[in-house]
Image (cartoon, grey):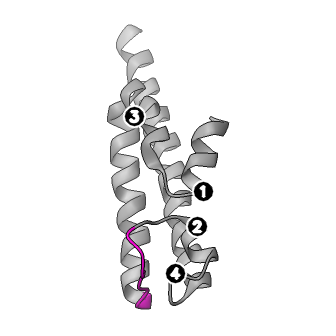
């Protein structure tokens, strides 16, 4: 929820654990795919990070060499994660309904 979002803005990803524990078959693959997209974009852009931490706050504070591209990579990765998670949840729910019927 809101606390997880706030934690994510400063690079603390542990707020996602309850969501992953609740529906691991949807959340974990979505997180893997979204992270892969964000990391691939960041690598392609040549983004470097001068601190051992991550997240939007690090880009905004100037620890990344291309902060706008870093933020773009994070936004695209988060969007891929969200769309994938919603899609997987819908597919799993449809399968559950079909199994009941």
* Residue bearing mark 2: 56
Residue topped by disc 4: 63
The residue singled out by tag 3 in the image is: 20
Residue 92 higher or lower than 66, as above or below:
above
Vertical relation: 23 (above or below) 82? above
Kindly report which numbered mark, 3 or 4, lies closer to the viewer in this rendering.
Answer: 4
First in sequence: mark 2 vs mark 4: 2
Can the viewer see residue 72? no
Residue at 51%, 90% (x, y): give it: 65
Front residue (pair 48, 78): 48
Q: Which residue is mark 1?
A: 9
Foreground label between 1 and 3: 1
Secondary structure beneath label 3: helix
Are the residues at dot 2 and dot 3 in contact (C-beta closer than 8 Å)? no
Q: Residue at x 39, y 8 (%)?
A: 100
Residue 72 appears at what percent x and percent y? 58, 75
Label 1 Cα neighbours within 10 Å, binned few <14 / some 14-19 / many ≥20: some
- The reply to whether discs 1 and 2 touch (Cβ–Cβ < 8 Å) is yes
Labels 2 and 3: the sequence-earlier one: 3
Cα–Cα gap, marks 3 and 4: 29 Å
Q: Nearer the viewer, mark 4 or mark 1?
A: 4
Up the image or down, 42 lies above or below 9; here it is below
């Amino acid at each position: 929820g809101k606390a997880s979002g706030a934690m994510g803005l400063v690079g603390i990803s542990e707020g996602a654990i309850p969501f992953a524990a609740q529906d691991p078959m949807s959340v974990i693959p979505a997180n893997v795919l979204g992270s892969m997209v964000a990391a691939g974009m960041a690598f392609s852009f040549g983004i470097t990070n001068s601190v051992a931490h991550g997240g939007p706050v690090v880009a905004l504070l100037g620890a990344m060499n291309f902060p706008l591209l870093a933020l773009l990579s994070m936004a695209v990765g988060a969007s891929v994660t969200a769309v994938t998670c919603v899609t997987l949840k819908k597919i799993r729910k449809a399968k559950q309904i079909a199994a009941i019927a």
